[in-house]
Amino acid sequence: MEVYGKILIIAMPCFLLLIIIEKLYGYYKGVDYVPLMDSVSSISSGIANATKDVLGLSISILTYGWLVSKLAIFTIEESALAYVIAFIAIDFQGYWTHRWAHQINFFWNKHAIHHSSEEFNLSCALRQTVSSFINLFTFLLLPAAILGVPEKVIAITLPIQFFVQFWYHTRYIGKMGFLEKIIVTPSHHRVHHAINPEYMDKNHSQVFIIWDKLFGTFQEELPEVPAVFGITRPAETWNPIKINYQHLGVLIRDAWHAENWKDKLRIWFMPTGWRPEGFDQKYPLHKIDNVFHFQKYGTENSKSLIGWSITQLLITLLLITYFFDNIAKIGIPGIFLYGGFVFLTVYSYTELMDKNRFSFIWEAIRFVYAATVVMYLGSWFGIDTVIPFGTYIVMGYLTLSLLVSIYFVTAEFKTSNQPILNS
């Protein structure tokens, strides 16, 4: 928990710097694939995911340590060879976990957030789940366990393998020659994120493209078929917490309305998007039929709303940097109180980004939550020992944030031509 938090403190500014460089490169080339509101939403999703991971809000039904203790037929010491085997084994696990997330209704819920951006850029790599609390796929690391790869090696290699997947989420890098035959490249991954019929459910590999070629899911990017990004049932919100549970909501409603128990049960395990017969007519959902003719979400925003959204994101990054750097000092239950504040923060300002007329209520709830924490702990999680008057600074920011939210809802949104969401 604490070690992972320290790793993220180093990784976050690196990711942010690369996203900024990609944005500036788009300006230089005159083709901008990194809209600011989309990027704020994506990075906010990454914040929520990182907070969930640091808090350890997920468990493995079957642990890798148990697999090694019961099944290892060799013993491999921590070495370069052990890390190579671990990397390949994790990549194999990642391929199948990723593929099943695309092919099975229930598992799609945890992965839809990653595909929800209607753009394709480095920031959308950070759109990761907060809705997955149980890891069911540790058994896929069976090859590493049989070979006796130490648990410590797997624990170190997992985040490295995850971070390596960041770079290929971009439209500014074309095909890469012979590397296309070995590793996952931006071209391969553009295919994976596309909703074109030619590209759907292809290229699930995470580092080595060999798995797709071996198991029949490879598709080359075609020059005559430009990739269109997103999900066929568009999210239509910037709020990553909502996106995380949209598909689950559809499954629950469909299971409730299903007239026979067979459909109520099998809906969870059928191919992604499957619904009982006649439900598309009885309970229609907005779905993109023509990928080249649909309106992208939230493309019209005032400079003031964009600026305030970026400000909220940057302040939130500072707040979670303090959190990740002081996990041991904050302790339990403080870390869970802080985690709750982070989730509430992301939910609140992304609701404002959606122009929700009730977003100021979420901001008020956040203010009351923070004020209650300060009264309970006597300060903002001990910040005054690090930053003089830190508690006053945090509460001052929250007061300003509430007032700005009220301004947008009562003034700017009412004079805007854009639709205002009711919920």
Image: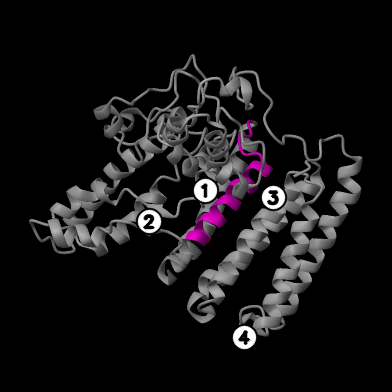
x 42%, y 31%: residue: 262
Q: Position of residue 97 (x, y in %)?
A: 35, 42
* Point 63% across, 80% down: residue: 383
Residue named by callout 2: 159
Residue 149 locus on image (x, y percent): 18, 58
Q: Which residues are magenta?
A: 31-52
Identify the residue at image location x=54%, y=38%.
247
- Residue 207 can be seen, yes or no: no
Is label 3 in contact with label 1 (beta carbons under 8 Å)?
no
Q: Earlier in the sequence, mark 4 or mark 1?
A: 1
Which circle's residue, 3 or 2, is located before the other in the chain?
Answer: 2
Q: Which residue is mark 1?
A: 126
Q: Position of residue 361 (x, y in %)?
A: 79, 57
Q: Nearer the viewer, residue 63 or 40?
A: 63
Secondary structure of residue under mark 2: helix
Q: CA distance from mark 3 to mark 1?
A: 16 Å
The CA span between labels 2 and 4 is 31 Å
Amino acid type indicated by mark 3: Thr
- The tag on residue 385 is 4
Nearest to viewer (mark 3 / mark 1): 3
* 125 left or right of 387 in image: left
Q: Where's the C terminus, which quadrant?
A: top right
